[in-house]
């Protein structure tokens, strides 16, 4: 990815409820995404739609990602989907460690194992980190540092080029109507902090694929977050379920210098 190319990721979560709707939404996004030179678009639908969307619609400016992947490639693991299966199905990206999965019991150790297995299978990982709350003493910084260091334990420096860190403060995610995006100043501060933690861990010259922001990102705050928040891209939930809104995010990102 060129230096200024932004990556905009749609996290559809557990939506929509039919293949027909999934195809319609994807096609509505693809028409715009395929025209934009400065944006890499990634759509992460639920597992059941992956094959359909990969085979019918994959294009070079739009890629498909999964929302999770297990830490083993095959075996007696009822209900799981493996990184190798995803890779063999033409999936290129995978979200690991989303706060909604952590809320179901995933810890940093599990996320670390999933990250390693996904990288080994040749997937690009979108590793999510984010604090539940903030305080004046800055406890969020030590929390994020612990998530990063433990989730990336044993990862080779050279693999960082295939890992995006998505910083998503849980209190800013739009699952609650009161939640609002974090200010671009605070995002800027956190993206610098994340790069510092990674440099301390992996050494000068470490090259993370990008540091992204997620949490109530939408058409109205995209420009501010990308320009002033110093984010390399966005992980978008709610606004990715409306093709018009999502396309406005893509177009705005495409016009950032
Ligand atoms: P949101 O979700 O854009 O709806 O806040 C982001 C996410 O949870 O990935």
Image: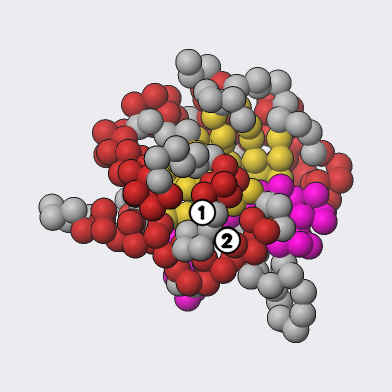
Q: Earlier in the sequence, mark 1 or mark 2?
A: 2
Q: Determine whether the residue tagged by mark 2 lies in a helix, strand or loop.
A: helix
- The relative height of residue 172 versus residue 155 in the rendered view (above or below) is above
Local packing at callout 2 (Cα closer than 10 Å; few below 14, some 14-19, many 20+) is: many
Q: Are marks 1 and 2 in contact (CB under 8 Å)?
A: yes
Query: Outermost residue toward the left?
Result: 136
Residue at (82% x, 55% y) in the render: 89
- Neighbours of disc 1 within 10 Å: few (<14), some (14-19), many (20+): many
Where residue 85 sits, quadrant-wise, is: bottom right
Question: Residue 127 — which label?
Answer: 1
Which residues are drawn in magenta?
A: 83-105
Which residue position is annotated with label 2? 115
Report whether 144 appears left or right of 155. left
Number of disc labels: 2
Judge left or right: residue 256 versus residue 135: right
Question: x, y (%) of residue 243?
Answer: 63, 35
Q: Nearer the viewer, mark 1 or mark 2?
A: 2
Give the spatial CA distance, label 1 vs label 2.
8 Å
Nearer the observer, 111 or 208:
208
Pinpoint residue 213: horizontal percent, then vertical percent: 43, 42
Q: Secondary structure at mark 1?
A: strand
Could you say where residue 145 lies in the image, as x and y percent from the top left?
A: 33, 56
In the picture, which quadrant includes the N terminus? top right
């Amino acid at each position: 990815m060129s230096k200024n190319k932004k990556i905009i990721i749609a996290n559809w979560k557990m939506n929509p409820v039919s293949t027909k709707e999934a195809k319609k939404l994807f096609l509505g996004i693809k028409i715009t995404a395929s025209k934009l030179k400065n944006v890499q678009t990634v759509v992460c639908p639920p597992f059941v739609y992956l094959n359909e969307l990969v085979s019918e619609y994959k294009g070079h400016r739009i890629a498909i990602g999964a929302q999770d992947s297990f830490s083993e490639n095959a075996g007696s693991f009822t209900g799981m989907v493996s990184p190798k299966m995803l890779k063999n199905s033409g999936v290129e990206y995978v979200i690991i460690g989303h706060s909604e999965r952590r809320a179901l019991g995933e810890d940093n150790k599990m996320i670390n194992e999933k990250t390693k297995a996904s990288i080994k299978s040749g997937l690009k990982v979108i590793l999510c980190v984010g604090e539940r709350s903030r305080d004046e003493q800055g406890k969020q910084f030590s929390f994020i540092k612990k998530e990063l260091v433990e989730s990336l334990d044993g990862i080779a420096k050279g693999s960082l080029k295939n890992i995006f860190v998505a910083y998503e403060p849980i209190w800013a995610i739009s699952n609650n109507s009161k939640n609002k995006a974090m200010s671009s100043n605070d995002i800027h501060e956190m993206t610098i902090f994340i790069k510092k933690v990674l440099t301390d861990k992996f050494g000068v010259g470490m090259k993370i694929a990008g540091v992204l922001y997620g949490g109530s990102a939408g058409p109205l705050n995209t420009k501010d977050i990308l320009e002033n928040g110093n984010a390399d891209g966005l992980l978008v939930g709610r606004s990715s379920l409306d093709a018009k809104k999502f396309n406005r995010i893509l177009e705005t990102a495409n016009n950032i210098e």
